[in-house]
Amino acid sequence: MLSRILIANRGEIALRIIRACHELGIEAVAVYSEADKGAPYLRLADEAVCIGPADCAKSYLNIPGIISAAEITDVEAIHPGYGFLAENINFAQICRDCGITFIGPPVEAMRLLGNKVQARKLAREARVRVVPGSDGIIEQVSESLELANKIGYPVIIKAAAGGGGRGMRVAHNDISLRSAFNSAHAEAEAAFGDGSVYLEKYIVEPRHVEVQVIADGAGNALHFYERDCSIQRRHQKMIEESPCPVLDKRTREGLCDAALRIIKKAHYVNAATVEFLLDEKKEYYFIEVNTRIQVEHPVTEMITGHDLIKWQLKIAGGQTIKFSQRNIRQTGVAIECRINAEDPERNFAPCPGTISKYIPPGGPGVRVDTHVHQGWTVSGSYDSMIAKLIVHQKTRTEAIATMRRALREFVIEPIKTTIPVCLDILSHNLFVKNKIDTGFVERNF
């Protein structure tokens, strides 16, 4: 087991990791920017180190600064959380070169799966169906036009090194594809330093379903079932639930087995999420692997009873999985709402400011993951998510009812948040009837 680690992140996920460390008897070192100085969760860490100003590039994305903090605090390992450096291959390699354990996958697996074109190739080798599209990078607009006319519109251009919805454009004809190709390439270059793009058939009105996987260094890999993440806005997830309410037992088993085949083929170690699109016929298509813990991991924890952060720490420390797949069961239904400091009435514009009134919900089956409190100032320098509200009940109907009640109880003032729009979505008759897809929010809100 590890004895002392550094957490290269902030806010809610940093607090989540600190708590998991302490329950395992591991010392936790936190880092913080000048904007986060004085945050209460820093006092819970065994040590806290300032790594720079509010600007992410000079603090949470400053690899030399984080490595220096790790060396002066004498840690064995670094947990990157999600976002920031979590999927940065260069950072993982530097950790390895410095003799520091990266709490995540091996660099080789990150490199293989981090590029979506290579990941698609690996999936095909693992006998997993992928969305029809290009076999590799598309260099010229003319190539994309030729392929689009072959497989049929609509199509989607995607950044090979992308994520978070950046570098993605949908096209419905030749004219829009020319524009989509150029804008996706430019956005990918600006966001990831890699303008490479590829093309896929755009599946109309799909569900977004992902499988949570944990793998150890001895070759054992288990799935912790699936999450439905179809409620999205501009490719950004808003509400997640598990189990996916439209999957039958046979489809679920096939989906989860496909995820494991990809993970084993990549010789993956630690936590991963294998993502799929599910069409109206319940045919599933591999799209990518997220080589980190996900924001929505509490949904899986609630339905399986397994602490995924602890498993990350245990596996990074050399422990192996001692139980089998049949020991992991889905129990009940869990739903998560992301609470962002955004104003839905102003096109979800960020809404930084000081919270003068904060009253979290409670009651049976309610969990709130957050680092904010009354008096906390939400910075405009970072991601706008300030809390995650998770509920767990026996049935989907009960879970929806509990989530509605919890959202009504949740008070965060005076800043604007996404609580009202989450409540509207949970109250929509199509959501209640489970007639949703990735375009649900755009069409109905």
Image: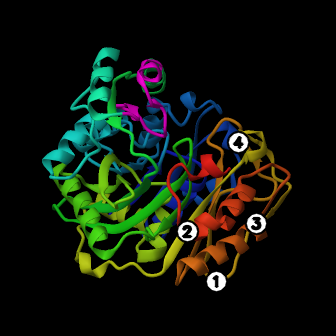
User: Which residue is identified by label 3?
Assistant: 410
Tag 4: residue type? Phe
Q: Earlier in the sequence, mark 4 or mark 2?
A: 2
Amino acid type for the residue under numbered disc 1: Pro
- For image coordinates 64% across by 67% down, the residue present is 429
Q: Judge by depth and name the residue closer to the eye, 363 or 61.
A: 363
Q: Is residue 244 above or below residue 182?
A: below
Circle number at residue 385: none
Of badges 4 and 1, the one in the foreground is 4
**In the structure shown, which secondary structural element does the residue marked by tag 2 occupy?**
strand
Contact between marks 2 and 3 (CB within 8 A): the answer is no
Question: Badge 1 is on which residue?
Answer: 364
Residue 438: percent from left, percent from top: 50, 51
Please identify, in this view, whether the residue under mark 2 or under mark 3 is nearer the observer: 2
Label 3 secondary element: loop
Residue linked to disc 4: 348
Horizontal side, residue 276 vs residue 70: left or right:
left
| Residue labelled with disc 2 | 335
The vertical placement of 310 against 28, above or below, is below
Q: In the rendered structure, which segment of residues is drawn in magenta? A: 153-181
Give the mark, 2 or 3, whose residue is nearer the N terminus: 2
Q: Which residue is drawn at 26% across and 29% down?
A: 150
Which colour scheme appears in the figure?
A: rainbow
The residue drawn where x is 21% and y is 32% is 135
In magenta segment, residue 172: yes
Considering the numbered disc 4 on the image, is that residue within a helix, a strand or a loop?
loop
**How crowded is the residue under tag 2: few (<14 C-alpha within 10 Å), some, or many (20+)?**
many
Label 4: few (<14), some (14–19) or many (≥20) C-alpha neighbours in 10 Å: some
Gap in angstroms between the C-alphas marked 2 and 1: 14 Å
> Which percent across, then down, holds residue 273?
36, 55
Q: Can residue 2 be seen by looking at this rendering?
A: no
